[in-house]
Amino acid sequence: MALALDPSVGVEVAADAVDRALLAGADSAKVMHGYQQQFEVNFDTHDVTLVRSTVSDSLSITVFVDGCRGATELTGRGHDAVDRAVKEAVTAARAGQPDFANVLPEDPATEAVSDGDEVPDKEQMIDAVLRFISAVRDEYPSLRTESSAYAFECTWRSYANSYGRVQHARRGRYRVNVMSSGKDGERSTSFNHGAVVSERPTADLATLVPIHRLLEDLAASFDPQPVPATFVGDLIFTPEALSVAAGTIAQAVSGMALIRKGTPFADSLGKAIAAPSFSLLHQPSALAGSTPFDAEGFANGDLDIIRDGVLSNFLIDWYSAHRLDRPMTTGCTNFVVAPGETPLEELIASTDQGILLGRFSGGMPNQKLDFSGVAKSSFYVEGGKVRGPLSETMIAGNFADVLQQIRAVSRETVDFGYFSGPWVAARGVTISTK
Amino acid sequence: MLDQLQRYSDQLAPYTELRLHNNYETSISMIGGTVMVNRATTIGGVSARSYQDGAFGFASLPSLSNDAIPQVLEQAIDNAVLLQRRAARSEGDLPDAGAGQGTFDYRSAVAAMTPKEQLDVLRAVDAYLRSTYPDLVNIDVMFNTLTIEKAVANSLGALAYSYVPRCTVMVRLSYQANDGVVEIYDSFGGFGEAQDHLFDIESMRPALDVLYTEVRDKAAGIYCEPGEHDVILDSALAGILAHEAIGHTCEADLVLGGSVAGDHVGDLIASEKVTLTDFAERGPDGKGGIAIHVDDEGTPCRDVTIIEDGVLKSFLHNKETARIMGEEPTGNARAYRFDDEPLVRMRNTAILPGTDRLEDMIAAVDRGYYFKRATNGQADTTSEFMFGVGCGYEIVDGKVGRAVRDTTIAGVAFDMLKTITHVSDDMTWGRGGMCGKKQPIPVGMGGPAVKCRIGVGGR
């Protein structure tokens, strides 16, 4: 069923769309062509529920007319459809308003990395899922799995712009998403989910560290209790919770946050914004699920964001760089929090009172980075020991303060493929119950 | 589209659904006065899902051509056969809940707005706010449309076409407080195409003025006191309450996955003042956030009363969950894009209005909070839920007082719903709800204001 395509054809498709945009009246244009073949095995507690194969083929076209921007995205690449789309984009641009940051890179792009399988072994993937269902049924009989999937995606992306700059890459990746909860008679637990991206297929999904951790934590989450009383104590981010927190921090050091004047870190470049034990790195080289190149065709490279507590770089993409008149740093976001020096056991043992945060379910942090929400899939820690699972427990604080209040970072880390990080303990968070 | 599907109706065997599907979107963002996004998107294609002896196979191609249809039909069957071969099963036929038929076209009779007219809406809002309120730190205005066009056929004779648009203008204001920048936002528009709404500045001015007052109030606002409080949830929040706290726990796939709702059918789980329904079509007043007459499995949609006078009555089903649980499909199977399979999703979910007046409800609170708008929400199979609150005020001695900063409210729905003592006599539908569950999907959320006791995050 799948249409045959190699990366060089993708570049030709993109370059052809650029030419059509120029013919339609654009002063300059850029095009991203994406083509993906996906094979997905969906499953629940009892069975494989669906086998799904999809093909996507899309063109994202941006045109500039007199410094004004117009864009369009469409599926397929038929000439008539592309001509219609670029005409609409040019019309939209002509209705727009000039922006001095609407420029395109002119120099040749550095080659991006292509890797991974092109075709999955479908039967082996189904077998892996059946093995997982059986393992969970045997080892975790009180857990129920729902809306879960083991997928293979092979993605070709090709970029071209009107200055002759081209870029292309192909990447084949496997992705496991498991959503599960505990149910034993009328006893139940919250649901939680785990995900892993990998370059190679996996025969035993239950042994993948994030999935194994998910199952173990859920099995230990029956009969939860609220914290005994409201207190100000330690918040220990698990790697899962840290992956979400890292996104919040990244947003606060992004070019868009600077443009919107919406970050407390606007004047903090080169200054300590976190404890010295904390380093947040943009490190695509360490992550299977990283992006080969960004929206302007720049190959994705490593970059320090926070190194030893000091804000080393903002996340400035091509557009933000021109808008803010700052050097470009990266247009991608693939984060790693560096491991620390404290063994996890010692990190827990040194906690007087706090919680081990499995998942944060809360409102979006505001521009000041205030947050408040519910601690889900979390455990109460007192006197250096994990005491039991939590329910109806809320946390509130400020991320900028939390970064300064980090007291320990674990040696151990978990690699999810899309993020890698340790356990991080911070003081001074309000932990409340009803 | 229907003609195209009809041509293949005799090839839909074994049980098969065939769907032609386009999503049309427009996104224009004016961030701080600069147009940073100005994009129109058309994503479409064809998909098929086949069912054979208990095994589902799905396939899609990014094309609406007649060439693509036989290919996806063949691939969907191949996938079902592959699954059947690796994991043999025999689970019987899917229930036949009737074959949905008809054309449900909600496109506007008014001429479409041009790109310039769309941008002029943003320019006018930005210019009004910038000139009237120069002390604002930042102004963002975003124009978004989403129209979903689909045609569905199945082996049981379903054949239906729908064209369902929505359009929102979102305005976000930032204001400098003593301790940093605070922001607030609100949405305008809702169901229908852009030209169906009044986006002229004269119509929007009163609400924009209120929004400015709210962001100033918030800048001078206080943090909530953490703990459980008496609160009034305005109708915008009650809609999210209906969706997050109850609706998700009553989706039959989540019930099968362990939702606590599965243990409580027939039980009193809420105040007797609470009746909660997931409405088909456009809801009881014809103003629901979405329109759905036939779902993506071809089932005619019907209303589902989830809670009636406080008693949990029933769940939301697709064909598969109905087969497993021995119920009737309810028309809740929905897919977001052409390459998405239908999942159990809510439609227009709402608490029905009561008899109380909002003013009296506020007066009945000695010390608590009046929460007006949510930012986001999440649910759990335990019925524990949370929403972020972006706009709210304290209540002291029955009167609205100082504004509060961003907070989160949370509770266990099956406990919290029993604390509802008042339900207001009006009802409002949200303007642009989206729900995430593997796929995003537009949903309608509505309700009256309710008075209840709930956990509030704070410092």
Image (spheres, rainbow, N blue to C red):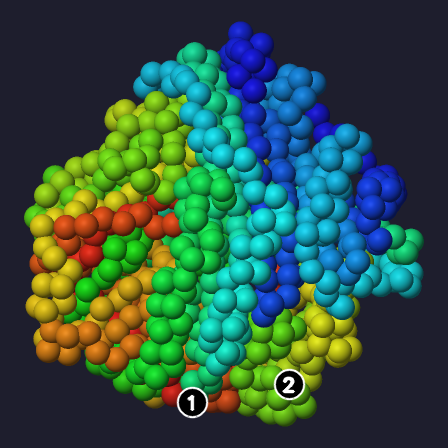
Residue nearest the observer in this picture, A16 or A409: A16
Q: Secondary structure at mark 1?
A: loop
Q: Which residue is mark 1?
A: B178
Q: Position of residue B233 (x, y in %)?
A: 23, 61
Give the side of residue B262 with respect to residue B322, left or right: left
Q: Which residue is mark 2?
A: A311
Work out which residue is located at the far front of the displayed protein and give it: B202
Q: What count of labels does the image hold?
A: 2
Amino acid on which disc 2 is placed: Leu
Residue nearest the observer in this picture, A98 or B289: A98
Mark 1 neighbour density, 10 Å: few (under 14) some (14–19) many (20 or more): few
Check if mark 2 and mark 1 are on a common chain: no
The correct choice, above or below, for B115 with respect to A344 in the image is above
Give the side of residue A221 with respect to residue A273, left or right: left
The correct choice, above or below, for A366 with respect to A215 in the image is below
Asked whether the viewer can see residue A358, the reply is no
Give the side of residue A400 with respect to residue B396, left or right: right
The correct choice, above or below, for B15 with respect to B47 in the image is above
Task: Report, in whole angstroms, how far the alpha carbon at label 2 lies from the one at label 1.
Answer: 24 Å
Q: Position of residue A148 (x, y in %)?
A: 47, 44
Q: Quadrant of residue B178?
A: bottom left
- The residue at the point 23 percent across, 40 percent down is B277
Do residues under tags 2 and 1 come within 8 Å of each other at their CB atoms?
A: no
Amino acid on which disc 1 is placed: Asn
- The residue at the point 43 percent across, 81 percent down is A398
Mark 2 neighbour density, 10 Å: few (under 14) some (14–19) many (20 or more): many
In the rendered structure, find residue A120 and report the number of the disc placed on it. none
Residue nearest the observer in this picture, A342 or B428: B428
